[in-house]
Image: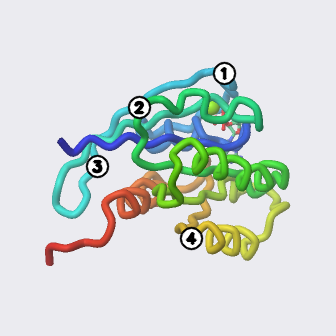
Amino acid sequence: SRTRKISVVGARGVGKSTLVVQYVDNYFLESYYPTIQNQFNKSISFRGQTYEVEVLDTAGQDEFTILQDSSTLVHGYILVYAVNSRSSFELLPVIRDKILESTGTDKVPMILVGNKLDLERKVGHEEGVKLAREFGIPYIEISAKTTSEQDISRIFVGLLEQIEGEKIDP
Ligand code: GDP
Ligand code: MG
């Protein structure tokens, strides 16, 4: 079937839940729910097919709690940091290493997201671009507060492209 499981990972407070809720339910999550891990389902039209996407919104990570729930098969990861938080940016290589360790391959579909674009930057655009290039994955900057659902959907479509690989049919 066309069910794809994706996991949203990143430091606490970077806006993982907010971006998922904004995308799936179209509203801005004002409050901070640090401990909730939740699954959301959304149908995405991709390459002329309907994909059922199960989004696992993980409860924020630190170096010790990343991927405790890695037993379930995940097809791809959204790596999120907040552009106003250097520490959340610096956590990404750690998170990525844990993912690669747990899957035993370096070919895990991922996309890098710099969130909170509406706030004062502590991490430059070029730094995000450079890290994504090092990881060999696409990079998207958004604000889960002000970016339209349409634009936020580029994250999910971009990740599906990584998961599904090169298009073969014309
Ligand atoms: P999580 O721990 O990664 O799931 O972070 P949350 O989604 O709970 O967000 C943490 C806080 O940041 C909440 O108060 C959100 O309202 C806020 N937030 C999330 N994304 C944005 C954003 O793009 N811009 C602004 N200004 N606030 C955001
Ligand atoms: Mg959350």
In the picture of the structure, the residue carrying the numbered disc 4 is 136
In the picture of the structure, the residue carrying the numbered disc 1 is 35
- Crowdedness of circle 1 by 10 Å Cα count: few (<14), some, many (20+)? few
Closest to the camera, between mark 1 and mark 4, is 4
Q: Is residue 4 left or right of residue 149?
A: left
| Residue 155 against residue 55 in the figure, above or below | below
**Does ligand 2 reach within 8 Å of label 2's beta carbon?**
no
Residue 128 percent location from the top left of the image: 70, 68
The CA distance from mark 1 to mark 3 is 27 Å
Q: Earlier in the sequence, mark 1 or mark 2?
A: 1
Residue 16 percent location from the top left of the image: 60, 40
Q: Is residue 125 left or right of residue 22?
A: right
In the picture of the structure, the residue carrying the numbered disc 3 is 44
The three-letter amino acid code for the residue at tag 3 is Ile
The three-letter amino acid code for the residue at tag 2 is Phe
The CA distance from mark 3 to mark 2 is 12 Å
The CA distance from mark 4 to mark 2 is 27 Å
- Crowdedness of circle 2 by 10 Å Cα count: few (<14), some, many (20+)? some
Q: Earlier in the sequence, mark 1 or mark 4?
A: 1
The CA distance from mark 3 to mark 4 is 24 Å
In the picture of the structure, the residue carrying the numbered disc 2 is 40
The residue positioned 55% from the left and 56% from the top of the image is 147
The residue positioned 72% from the left and 41% from the top of the image is 11
Q: Earlier in the sequence, mark 3 or mark 4?
A: 3
